[in-house]
Amino acid sequence: MTAHIRPVCAVWVGMVCLVFCSRLSGMKAASICGNAQAECHFLSLANLFDRVIQHSARMHGISNDLHSEFELYFLPSKNQVSRVGRNCHTSNILTPNGKENAQRIEREELTEVIMKLLAAWRDPLWHFHQSVARNHRFNGYGSNKSLEMSDMAHELRKGVQKVVEKMQTLGVISNSVGGLASPEALLAADGSGWRFMKDSDLLYCFRRDSNKIQNYLKILKCRIVPEHGC
Amino acid sequence: MKRRLGLAVLLMLSAALRCRSASPPGKPVLIGCRSPEKETFTCWWEPGFNGGLPTRHRLFYEKEGSEEVHECPDYWSAGKNSCFFGKEQTSIWVEYSLTVVAFNALGNTSSDLFKIDDVMKIVKPYTPENVTVLVNDTANTPYLCVSWNHPPKVDTKSGWTTIKYELRVQKEDNKPEIFHPNKKNSFKVYNVDPGATYTVDMRCQLDQSSWSEWSTASVVKIPNYFQNEKPFWILVSIFSVIPLLATICIVVLKRKFVKQWLLPPVPGPKIRGVDVQLLKSGRAEDVINALIGNQNFPPAAAWMDQTEEYLLVSDSNDWLLTDPYISQKKKSLVIPAGVQLEIQCRTSAPAQSDCENAEVGKDGKVEPDHLAQTKESVLNVAAPSVSSGSKEAASGNAAGPTGYVGIQQHKGTQGAGPNAAQWDYSWVKEVNGETIFILKNEDAAAGWTVPGWEENTAADYSRVKEVNGDDVVLLQKHDSADSSCKKKEDRSAEWTNQKAKSRHGSDCGKGACLQIAGNGYVDSVPRFYVE
């Protein structure tokens, strides 16, 4: 009797594992709602938006902290002259600078702007973190923050892609967004303009752009799913 | 002429003075800018000295990324010395560079460059509107219900701004409490105390911008509920105190009863038929009767077998002869130690040699035997120790007080009972076989004196007065020193009182009356009696 228990247990555990794994993989593909209800789909889209917006808010907070710290330690005297030359590498991306402008443009365009911005910052942030870690310019706090910032930008980009996919499946936006050539290709021409940016300018520019991303995401959500907390 | 010259000089001087006071305007200073809703903003400046001439101020600005210089679109909407930038002119995430220039007839003066990094940085909303506080007192748990509206002109619906509120509640003079409501328009404050005064105000924030000013405070007072309930509680306390006091009074006044009820006393031991009170206060006789009365002692018949007839020894033949009854009997006596014995012996015939002699044997047994010619036929035969003592006495030794015998001296009186006779004690001189020789008094007196026996023994020993019947010996308390009858009687009476009731009281004559068990000497305490 006892001799049979062990193999029986192993088989049982194996079966349980199989069931779970199949379930998990199934969960990746299938949505919570299933195929039926539209309300449920929109609810899940609103949830996705909320998560993404929260993520972007956190990213902006980190960038704000880093910029303040940088100004405190490395630029004690405000040098207004040097600001004249400030030029962010994302300046060529046309972004709506006001509420009306943001509400006037198309959803797809707004979504594209977001995607472009996020794509434009992936490499510079990573580079920045590498230089900070290598040169020990910031204290430990700054080094951690730069890595976190870089990771968060990366994850936010993936999250926004998910939202876009969801919107496209729901028919909220046209499929032209995903059909564009990848933002990386667009920026490839600009190339490595960001490599010559100063760290202070980089931090300043990213702080502004992360705020833009957060705002655009909020506007997009309230345009697409306004009844869920706008 | 001179007047005209003076006037001209005066005019020229005044003109010259006026010309010197005029100057180009002083330098204006830009104070600050503020955007209340992230869509427009306003900037203010402080003009300098106007130079005595009418001065005009103009604001010029440049936006980031363009060299074009723009002038302020609106100088009047926001008041004097201000510039209002409308929605079209406002661009967020764009850097502004501002300059104010003062113009007058003599020149112009520019202020320092004022840079706005980002309009987001100058955002400061207005205070929340219509902050109202209501006190809700349902279910005896009061709470404050605070309601408000968003500040004017703020667009919260399009997602352009995310507004955050802060609520401040201060109880009287304590430290204020800060709350962050999640809802847009209302909030409930629960931890409020009845009867206290609270001050409530609010402020708000747009997208991590600067906080607005605090709104106008609302002061509320929460009604005190315990006051309404006070009379109720007073009544309750009164009605509960009265029974409590009554209970205490009862317990105190009847504490004995309560104590008895709570801790009943343990009953003491009880013997059937015996009264405890009698034992406590009664006389000895009653006590003994009570204790013994219920019990059935085995009859003292055993003793009867052992006791023998009393022997009365008297030295008067006549007296002896009056009672022929006893002479028939011939019994042996058992004499317990320390007891005097009077043996009466009788003979049937006067002619016969008198009475029987009482001979004290070695073992104490006295056997009546014929008396010899001696006339002293009354013998008080002592106890076995006495017998040895008497023998010794007979041998001439000085014996103790126990060696004497009591002799009834009948000096020629016939038939006279022993009542009238004088008892006297004499020493046994010699016991010779069947004969006991008794010393005369004078001999005794001359021979020796036993120290201390006169006074001691007189009261200790009792003389047999009369033998009645088979087993009754009447004793008389003997006092050799005192010959008065009265005293004897007194003494005997006294002696009688000490005794318990005698069983054969009817036979008692004058004087003492006692039962003895078969020996002539009687102690003052009867040991037993014979039926």
Image (cartoon, rainbow, N blue to C red):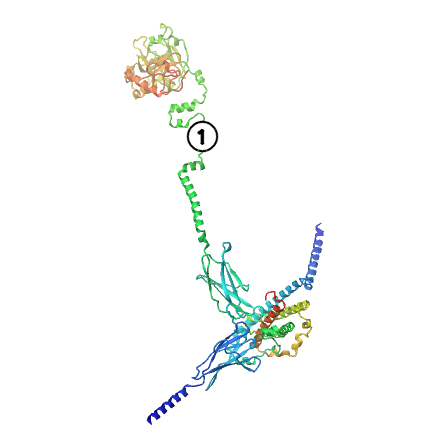
Residue A75 placement (x, y as % from top left): 52, 76
Q: Which residue is at a point 45% across and 61% down the rendered structure image?
A: B174
In this figure, what is the number of numbered marks? Answer: 1
User: Label 1's element?
Assistant: loop
Residue at label 1?
Answer: B269
Residue A125 visible within the image = no
Q: Residue furthest bottom?
A: B1
**Chain letter of the residue beneath label 1 in the structure image:** B
Instruction: Identify which amino acid the numbered label 1 is placed on.
Output: Pro
Q: Dividing the image into 4 quarters, which one contains the N terminus of chain B?
A: bottom left
Is residue B10 shown to the viewer in this render?
yes
Task: Classify residue B343 by image quadrant.
Answer: top left
Residue A73 picture location, percent across and down: 52, 74
On the image, which quarter does residue B318 sit in? top left
Which one is in front, B460 or A156?
Answer: A156
Q: Is residue A1 left or right of residue B243?
A: right
In terms of depth relative to the viewer, which is nearer, B341 or B111?
B111
Q: Nearer the viewer, residue A214 or B409?
A: A214
Residue A69 x, y percent position in the rendering: 53, 73
Apparent side of residue B468 relative to residue A108 in the rendered image (left or right): left
Instruction: Characterize the local packing of mark 1: few (<14), some (14-19) or many (20 or more) Cα atoms within 10 angstroms.
Output: few
Location of residue A55 (image quadrant): bottom right
